[in-house]
Image (cartoon, grey):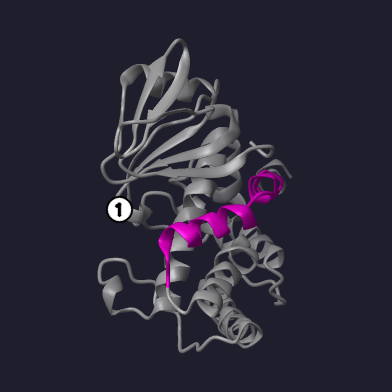
Amino acid sequence: MDARIPMLYLEHAAIYLANSCVMYKDAEGKQSYALHPANYAVIMLGVGSSITHDAAIMIAGFNTIILWCSSEGLSIHTVSVGCTFDIKNAKQQVERITRDRFKLWNMLLDARGCSHIPSQSYKELLLVEASYMKHRYAEMAKKYGVTWNKRIPRIANMDKDDILNKSITHCNIALYGIATSVIYGLGYLPQFGIIHGRGATPLAYDIADVFKLETSIPCAMRHVAQHKTMDYRILMAEFTEMCCDIPSKMVDLMLRLFKS
C-alpha cells in the first residue's frame, strides 16, 4: 500500500481485460491503454465509466480498491472491498476504539500537531479542534495569498461556495478515497470511526483529517492562487503529486493507533 500511487481518476473510460492484462479505452474509444492495478492504491471511476466483470476481479486481485463515483468524484456510490484474509485487524480496531476512544482521539489530535490538554470530554475536544483548524486556515490563506472567509464543507449545493471552498472539498473527497483504500487494504473497518460517527466511512474521515494540512488545504490554496479559478483535472493532478507518500503515512498512523 505504501509504495503505490495514491489514486487514478477516470471518466468516460471503458475498462476491460485483454490477454490477461487490464486495459482501458478513452472517451472516444479509439485508443487503448494498459492499466497496471498494482501501481495504484485506489482507482476512481467517474461518470460515463464502465468495467467488465473479469477486469474488476483482476484489479481486486492486486488489492486495489475501486470507487464508483459521481462526476469529478464528488460522491462515492459503491466501493469494492480489498482482499484481506482474516479479521484480526478489524477485531483489534473494534476492541481498541471501544476501550480507548478518548485516548485515540487525543492521539489523532497530536498527529495533527494540535497542542492540547488530554481530555475525556467530547465537547472540549471538538472545541479544541475547531479553534486549531480556524487558525491554521487563516495562516495558510495568508501564506498563499488567497482570500479566506470560512470553511463550508458543502457538497449538495457546492455551486453556492466560493472557488477556494470548492477546491478544498474536491481535494478532501479524493483524500477520503485514499484513506478508504488504505483502511480496506490493511483489513480495518472504515465504518467504525474514532471521532466521526456518521457517514459511510467515518474512520476514513478521521485518518484523512490528520493529513489535510499537508495535502488538501495547501493544494487547493496554491491552485486557486496560481489559476484564480478551479480546473478539476489540473487540481487532481497537483493533488496526486502532493500525496505520493500519504498512503505510507496513513499505514504508519493506523498501526500506531490500533497495534499499540
Task: Name the one closer to the observer, 108 or 174.
Answer: 174
Looking at the image, the residue that sits furthest to the top is: 19
Residue 181 in picture, x, y percent from top left: 51, 40
Label 1 sits on a secondary structure element that is helix
| Amino acid identity at mark 1 | Ser
Q: Which residue is mark 1?
A: 71
Residue 223 vs 108, above or below: the answer is below
Segment colored magenta = 230-254
Question: In the image, what residue occupies the spot 40% across and 71% down?
Answer: 166
Residue 191 in picture, x, y percent from top left: 43, 46
**In the visual, does 19 lie left or right of 109?**
left
Question: In the image, what residue occupies the spot 55% across and 79% down?
Answer: 225
Question: In the image, what residue occupies the spot 74% across and 45% down?
Answer: 260
Residue 49 vs 157, above or below: the answer is above
Question: In the image, what residue occupies the spot 56% across and 63% down?
Answer: 209
Residue 111 vs 247, above or below: the answer is below
Task: Name the one closer to the observer, 112 or 55.
Answer: 55
Quadrant occupied by the N terminus: top right
Looking at the image, the residue that sits furthest to the front is: 30
Residue 87 vs 42, above or below: the answer is above
> From where the camera sits, is residue 196 visible?
no
**In the visual, does 47 lie left or right of 259?**
left
Residue 136 in picture, x, y percent from top left: 62, 81
